[in-house]
Image (cartoon, coloured by chain):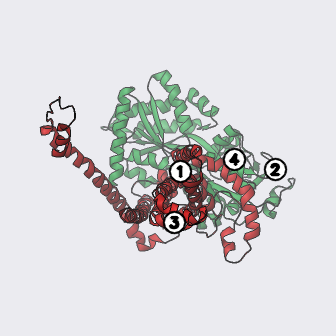
Chain colours: A green, B red
């Protein structure tokens, strides 16, 4: 697309101009909005330590992918993993940074935070408009000790295409064959029922304003705003609460060893205590950087972020750090796969 | 130039001899003026060409059916503009229907009834409505108007009018608050100042003699309004409404907040929908380069451009025909 190239050049020009004001070695990244708070907090802390600034523009995963394909930034960020063939054709290395999760939030009269339990198939049928009342027998069966009102259910979804919707619809598709064939999983889908609101804050606001509403947001957002969340019945048949321990359980239940391009699914894993809607967010890095030193700076930054200080910052913001074994594999991939002029840029 | 020199030369003082400085600068100045004028044309042409060219693959993929197909499914990559074109026109028409009587009232009040002391404050207040950024309308709509409509307006209307035949279809669905009606109401507020300002101008241009004559033969205020002022400026007023309509068609942020953003077709005023502009705003960040989705979005932009162009051309035509006569 011609104009996007021109746009890219414009962004690049303004980027270099800004970089000229700050520091010559600043790192530029762009993409996913979900991990943006973590990247920005890391960037601020890293600047104090290493005096290299990190400019991260939260423009959405699609934008991040476009910019790294055009090589207008040093690294791209994406919530949805890029397809294997697209990674290969654009010569990109993909690796995860932090793990996040999606939770369901509700506004049901007489139901307090954490007192309602739902399951994947029930959620899928709510979002398909097949379960329309809160006192539906299928919800009642999961909540024997909760008094459910006869109110109508209003499903609320993200109207802007987002990684959150991708993760949530992936879970619905995994839990319900019906959803998989009728709707599918993507950053935005053709929602069969309900209304859309823009951003996490839009979904949270609409749920808060609408009696009988149900929505989904990132856990990070729900925790920071103390929203009323639900429990979920996971694949192992256990009712789990959304908290750090159940997210960690999902991360360790994922199959990292055989996953290609670190694309290990943490959706609806079989772990006994695993929260079923968990996903990693990814960084995209050129395997053939034009400027090897700059690429090394990017890896140095993420190397620090995977360390003790970076983990502490991530946890404070309610993100889940990666298991240590995965981080080891990522460092190995940096060494093996990123080469400038045929020479490895990173060495462990 | 010659004319200007003549005027300057004839200045009453006559003491300062006029030194013509325009020999070199004048052609440059004229050249710059030409460039500014042509710049707009070229820019407009390039934008149209970019939108059309960028969206062409989507049009080729789906054919003319793209214009009315109601499917917008990013998963299966089946795109159609039907729902958005409908939503764009539906919400804009609601806006005009709501804004029109209000604008009539305000404009006539300001020109005929309001005491001089009140004219300025009310006039300024109307103008200030136009100065509020669209995102503020969106936030206000989302946090204040949507909950109010969901709590107090929709439930009784759904209960009373929903079961009626034919018009009942307009009042069905759950009381979400967000939807076509809410979007139309917010849009009405946003186009109100533009329509009102033009109405005031039109009403002020009615020759006082005609009005006085009407009052003289015993006509009431309403009769003068109904039979003299409005017929006198009717064409220009229609043009003003079209101008407001054109603005409502392209409004993005405020609409995105309150329309409910559903890519489903529904005849109900309360059902969530989407407009062309809101769909582009929602989907653009995650539309990868070269994807069919991005091409479909560009084609949507082109369709909006064409709709707005037709509306604007009609309004110009109507306003101009009046000014000439």
Kindly report the distance in space between the C-alpha atoms of the residues bearing marks 1 and 2: 34 Å
Label 2: state its secondary structure.
loop
Sort mark 4 into few (<14), some (14-19) or many (20+) by Cα contacts within 10 Å: many
Q: CA distance from mark 3 to mark 2?
A: 63 Å
Distance from Cα at disc 4 to Cα at disc 1: 39 Å
Front disc: 2 or 4: 2
Which of labels 3 and 2 is toward the front? 3
User: Is the residue at mark 3 from the same chain as the one at mark 4?
Assistant: no
Q: Nearer the viewer, residue B43 or B25?
A: B25
Q: Position of residue B315 (x, y in %)?
A: 42, 63
Mark 1 highlights which residue?
B253
Question: CA–CA distance between discs 2 and 4?
Answer: 24 Å
- The residue pinned by badge 4 equals A274
Q: Secondary structure at mark 3?
A: helix
In the rendered image, residues at marks 2 and 4 fall on the same chain: yes
Q: Secondary structure at mark 4?
A: loop
**Mark 3 and mark 1: Cα distance apart in space:** 40 Å
Q: Could you classify mark 3 by the number of other residues whose Cα lies within 10 Å: few (under 14), some (14-19), or many (20 or more)?
A: some
Q: Are tags 4 and 1 found on a single chain? A: no
Which chain letter goes with mark 3?
Answer: B
The location of residue A308, given as percent across then percent down, is: 58, 27
| Chain containing the residue with disc 1 | B
Q: Is the residue marked by circle 1 packed among few (<14), some (14-19), or many (20+) residues within 10 Å?
A: some
Q: Judge if badges 1 and 2 mark residues of a common chain.
A: no
Do the residues bearing badges 3 and 4 touch, measured as CB atoms within 8 Å? no
Task: Give x and y (percent) for residue A68.
Answer: 40, 44
Q: Identify the disc placed on residue B228.
A: 3
Of labels 3 and 4, the one closer to you: 3
Give the camera-side residue of A273 and A98: A98
Say whether disc 2 or disc 4 marks the residue closer to the N-terminus: 2
Q: Chain of mark 2?
A: A
């Amino acid at each position: 697309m011609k104009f996007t190239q021109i746009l890219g050049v414009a962004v690049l020009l303004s980027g270099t101009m800004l970089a000229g004001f700050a520091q010559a070695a600043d790192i530029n990244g762009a993409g996913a909005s979900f991990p943006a708070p973590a990247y920005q907090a890391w960037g601020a802390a890293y600047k104090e330590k290493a005096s290299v600034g990190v400019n991260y523009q939260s423009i959405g995963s699609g934008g991040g992918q476009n910019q790294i394909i055009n090589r207008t930034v040093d690294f791209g960020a994406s919530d949805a993993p890029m397809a294997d063939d697209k990674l290969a054709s654009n010569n990109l290395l993909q690796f995860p940074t932090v793990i996040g999760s999606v939770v369901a939030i509700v506004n049901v009269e007489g139901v307090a935070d954490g007192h309602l339990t739902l399951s994947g198939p029930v959620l899928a049928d709510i979002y398909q408009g097949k379960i329309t009342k809160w006192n539906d027998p299928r919800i009642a069966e999961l909540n024997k000790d909760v008094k459910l009102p006869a109110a109508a259910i209003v499903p609320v979804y993200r109207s802007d295409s987002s990684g959150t919707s991708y993760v949530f619809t992936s879970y619905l598709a995994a839990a319900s064959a019906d959803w998989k064939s009728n709707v599918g999983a993507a950053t935005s889908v053709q929602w069969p029922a309900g209304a859309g609101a823009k951003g996490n804050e839009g979904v949270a606001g609409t749920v808060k304003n609408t009696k009988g509403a149900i929505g989904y947001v990132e856990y990070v957002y729900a925790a920071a705003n103390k929203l009323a969340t639900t429990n979920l019945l996971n694949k192992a048949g256990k009712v789990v609460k959304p908290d750090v321990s159940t997210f960690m359980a999902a991360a360790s239940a994922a199959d990292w060893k055989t996953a290609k391009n670190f694309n290990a699914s943490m959706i609806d894993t079989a772990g006994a205590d695993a929260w079923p809607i968990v996903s990693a967010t990814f960084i995209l890095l050129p395997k053939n950087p034009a400027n090897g030193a700059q690429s090394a700076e990017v890896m140095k930054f993420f190397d620090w972020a995977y360390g003790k200080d970076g983990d502490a910052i991530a946890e404070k913001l309610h993100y889940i750090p990666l298991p240590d074994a995965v981080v080891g594999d990522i460092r190995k991939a940096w060494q093996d796969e990123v080469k400038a002029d045929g020479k490895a840029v990173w060495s462990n | 130039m010659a004319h200007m020199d003549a005027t300057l030369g004839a200045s009453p003082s006559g003491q300062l001899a006029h030194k013509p400085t325009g020999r070199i600068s004048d052609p440059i100045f004229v050249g710059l003026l030409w460039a500014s004028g042509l710049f707009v044309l070229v820019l407009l042409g390039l934008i149209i060409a970019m939108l059309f060219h960028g969206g062409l693959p989507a049009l080729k993929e789906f054919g003319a059916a793209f214009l009315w197909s109601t499917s917008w499914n990013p998963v299966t990559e089946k795109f159609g503009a039907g729902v958005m074109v409908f939503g764009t026109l539906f919400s804009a028409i609601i806006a005009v229907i709501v804004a029109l009587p209000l604008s009539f009232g305000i404009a006539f009040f300001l020109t005929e009834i309001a005491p001089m002391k009140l004219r300025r404050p009310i006039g300024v207040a109307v103008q200030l409505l136009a100065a509020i950024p669209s995102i503020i309308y969106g936030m206000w709509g989302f946090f204040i108007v949507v909950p109010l409509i969901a709590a107090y307006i929709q439930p009784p209307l759904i209960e009373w009018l929903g079961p009626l035949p034919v018009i009942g279809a307009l009042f069905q669905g759950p009381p979400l608050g967000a939807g076509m009606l809410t979007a139309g109401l917010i849009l009405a507020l946003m186009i109100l100042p533009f329509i009102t300002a033009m109405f005031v101008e039109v009403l002020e241009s009615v020759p006082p003699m005609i009005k006085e004559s009407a009052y003289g033969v015993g006509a009431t205020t309403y009769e003068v309004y109904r039979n003299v002022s409005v017929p006198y400026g009717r064409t220009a007023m229609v043009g003003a409404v079209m101008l407001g309509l054109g603005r409502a068609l392209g409004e993005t942020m405020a609409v995105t907040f309150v329309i409910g953003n559903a890519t489903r077709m529904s005849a109900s005023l309360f059902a969530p929908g989407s407009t062309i502009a809101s769909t582009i705003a929602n989907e653009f960040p995650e539309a990868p380069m070269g994807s069919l989705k991005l091409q479909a979005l560009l084609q949507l932009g082109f369709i909006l451009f064409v709709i707005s162009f037709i509306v604007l051309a009609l309004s110009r035509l109507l306003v101009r025909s009046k000014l000439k006569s």
